Structure formats: C-alpha cells, structure tokens
Amino acid sequence: MNRSRSSWDKKAPQPPVTRLTRSSSSQARHSDPAELQDSGPSPYGKQRKKQTDSALAQDLSQMSVSGQDGVPTSKGKMSKGPQPTGSRSRGGLASVSRLVKLGRCKNVVVVAGAGISTASGIPDFRTPGTGLYANVEKYNIPYPEAIFNIDYFSNDPQPFFSLAKALYPGSHRPNYIHYFIRMLHHKGLLLRMYTQNIDGLEKVCGIPDDKLVEAHGSFATASCHLCYTPYPAEEAKHAIMNDNVPICTFCAATVKPDVVFFGEDLPQKYFLHTEDFPKADLLIIMGTSLQIEPFASLVNTVRSTVPRLLLNRHAVGPFEKVPLRRNDHMELGDLADTVRRFAEMLGWSNEIEELMSQETVSFTTSVSSSPSVSGQMPCQSTSNGLMSRGASEPQGRMETSRSRPGAQTAASSGSEETDSETDSKSTASSSPSN
Ligand code: CNA
C-alpha cells in the first residue's frame, strides 16, 4: 500500500502508477469513445464494435423506458425525470440481465460500498438512524469524520480503535450480495470488483485476491501511521482488542490497521482502474452513496457506450441527474432483494444458494464477543468541507465530494457524453416499498 502522504505531497517523481492514472483519465476525457474502444486493450475490434453497438442499441431500444417523477435521491429529494413504468422486471435489472444472457457482458466491473454489507449486520455511513454518522456520540469525537481523520488519530487513536474492535473481520458473514458477486466471477464475467469496504467480506466469500481491489484498505495489514513501518497485523489486532495501543518499533508512534483514512493515499492496487475501466463492458454500482473521492469518480470512467447499472436504495452520483445518461439503468430498493431478483432473472439463484450452503467459510471467531456495530468505517465526510476535490479526475487520495452533480460532471473522465447525453435507452425503477 502506498500511503505515504509525504511521498505524494513532496517528492518530485511520482510513482508510475500515479502518472498512469492521470494520463489514462486524460485520455478518456478527451478521446472519442469509439477511438478509445478500438485503440485500447478492449477485446473488440472495429468491426466487432459496430456490430456490438448496433445490436446493443436495438436491444435497449426495445426496453421499456423507466420514467419517474419520483426517484428518491441520496439527498432525500425526489428527482424529476423519467418515471419507471410497468413492473420492476421491465426496469434496469431486466435490461441488463438480457445483455448478460446474450453474452454481451464479459468484462463486468463492480463498484461497491457499505450498502452491500448492511445485510451482514454492518451499518453503513449515512443511512439515517443506523449509520456511523448518526451514532458518533459513543466515540466522544467532535464530528463524525474525526474517527477516520489521520490527524485526529495521531492525537487520540481511541475513537478509531473502539470502532475497529467492532469492525475487525471475523465478526460478520458475507451475505447473498457478496455471493452474487462471487458468482459473477464463477461465471467468468468479473473483470474486477472495486470495494470501498474494509470488512473483508469479499475475501471471506471467496472472491479471489486478483479480482478484488480494496480501495480503502483493510485490516489485513498494519503499519505505523507516521513512518509506515510495517507491524504484524495479528499483534496490532491483539493489542486493539485488548484496549492497548500498538506502538511502532521504529519510531514509537501509534500503529494502525492499513485502513485508508481521510487524507491518506489509496493502495497502489487501486490504480488498476486505469486498465480495467476502459475494458469494462458493464459497470454495476452497488450500495454506495458515491460521496468519497477519488473512488466515486471511477464510475465516470467507463466508455460512454457501456451500460451502468445502479443498485441502491437511492439514486446517487450521476444517477441523480435526470434524464439518465444513455445506457444507464437503476433499480432502487433494498439491495438484498434487488440482487435476489437479479439472480433469478439470470437463472443463477440455485447456484448461488448451493454455493452459500456448501461454503464452509473459515469464519474466524477470534474476535470474541464482537461489539455490536452501530457505526462504522473509515473515511471522510462532506459537511466540514475537508478536502473536497470536487471536480477532479480520479486521483489517489481519499476525499469527500462536496457537490455530487457538479463533481460528477467535471470529474467525468469517460467522455463528454457521460453526463450530458441522455435518451430513452436508460431505465430506472424503484421498489414501491423503498
Ligand atoms: P455510505 O455513504 O454509507 O453509503 C451507503 C449507501 O448504501 C447509501 O446510499 C445507502 O442508501 C445504501 N444502502 C445501505 N444499505 C442498503 C440496503 N440494504 N439496500 C440498498 N441500499 C443500501 O457508504 P459508502 O460505501 O458509499 O461510503 C464509503 C465509505 C464507507 C468507505 O470508505 C467505507 O470504508 C465506509 N464503510 C465501510 C463499511 C464496511 O466495510 N462494511 C461500513 C460502513 C462504512
């Protein structure tokens, strides 16, 4: 993990991956999507591309247009725009299911957030009432973001360590949503999963390491928060679980799990996105508010012809802007329910159930009597205005987006078409109950 803040801030030669990121983003932003598709590492040639786009357009034009004057957004407002008509099966799920079944989605990228783990009993950040931001009093911190603020941690690590005790992997089990993603891999369709989560449930459910990017780090390793000297993760865990503070053997500063805090750099593996997103032929966005940069802007870096499917309780990010972009689809409601329906449409339900029942997850219970999680994760927030990069291209340090729609538009590195071009080839539906 490259989380040396000083190296990013001060050293002249940046790691090659950093330059690659900017170069790639720039290319995506300024290139014609067709050129990008043809010249990039995409498996499609020119001829194939024309056929694919044509067939895709035909498929999508036959789909029912969602439409709605009442899609709930992450801000709790109702967006104006196309209303979902007909049953939910005619919405985004059906459209995308059809493409998958037709074999048109073989490089699927999944972008996920805390919402995929709420069904495992781990609260997210922002859900009113249950999220960390609604339950910070117990940690005795001045503002919610402090718990994942590296400077605050430097002065007082206890709030984060209290939270960490509840979050250390071993206390929770993967749910149907995780296994659905694993099934994508099993079917040979998963190019990569990019998760913001630090609960480790993706690995527990069997998504292999080479298919997974834990963009906000994990508890699997630990190091000094000042000099970055590695520290044995198990020893750090043992200390934290016993209300002790792990101390760096080199500089005596506090050790922390390699969870990315607000203001820290993301792991180098994150920069695989410069290769993956141009290759993607389907982007599935699940359970995230898309509030954390640079992660949030990743969704704007797929080619403009690539279908994007949002599965969430609310419209978020570019899906808050209506009408939706061409080939954007969303299915709003409880994620576990939605994913089950998705699996049914794909004909994968039995296989997933079988996988779950057969799975002998080596569920480490070393975290005895884990505290109930009433808050969670690392990162950052918006309200204090800390490091909002806003209209930036995806870079390497974690921040919070201040203004979603604006940030999305400007941060869009997929193409100019990303947020401006809309037509009937987008679908949205929402569960009446949500
Ligand atoms: P967030 O900002 O809390 O957003 C979560 C999103 O998921 C919201 O839009 C919710 O409406 C939605 N959601 C939650 N539950 C459901 C559900 N059952 N059905 C449908 N939608 C649902 O969290 P993000 O992931 O966007 O924020 C990124 C932060 C949160 C990352 O840095 C994470 O490390 C951090 N986080 C991680 C975990 C975890 O590892 N499980 C938990 C909490 C926070």
Image: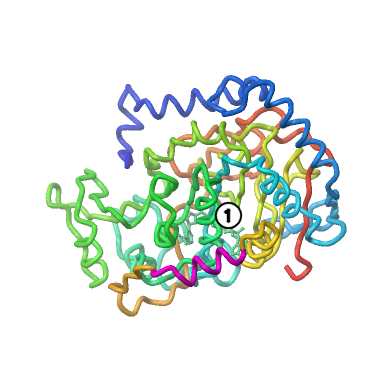
What is the three-letter code of the residue carrying label 1? Thr
Residue at left 59%, top 41%? 106
Q: Is residue 29 left or right of residue 15?
A: right
Q: Secondary structure at mark 1?
A: loop
Q: Which residue is mark 1?
A: 288
Q: Where in the image, quadrant-wise, is ligand 1 located?
A: bottom right
Residue 206 is left or right of residue 44, and the answer is left
Range covered by the magenta-colored residues: 349-360
Q: Quadrant of residue 52?
A: top right
Ligand 1: does it lie within 8 Å of the C-beta at label 1?
yes
According to the image, what is the colour scheme of the structure? rainbow
Report the residue at 68% width, 49% height from top: 101
The foreground one among 208 and 349 is: 349
Q: Say if 404 sits above or below 53 in the image.
A: below
127 inside magenta stretch: no
> Can residue 154 be seen?
yes
Task: Bin the neighbour count of mark 1 within 10 Å (Cα to Cα): few under 14, some 14-19, many 20 and up.
Answer: many
Residue 357 shown in magenta: yes
Q: Nearer the viewer, residue 362 or 364?
A: 362
Question: How many marks can you see?
Answer: 1
Q: Position of residue 187 (x, y in %)?
A: 54, 50
Q: Is residue 146 visible?
A: no
Seen from the viewer's position, the closer of residues 196 and 65 is: 65
Residue at 75 percent across and 54 percent down: it is 94
The outermost residue toward the left is 249
Q: Quadrant of the N terminus?
A: top left
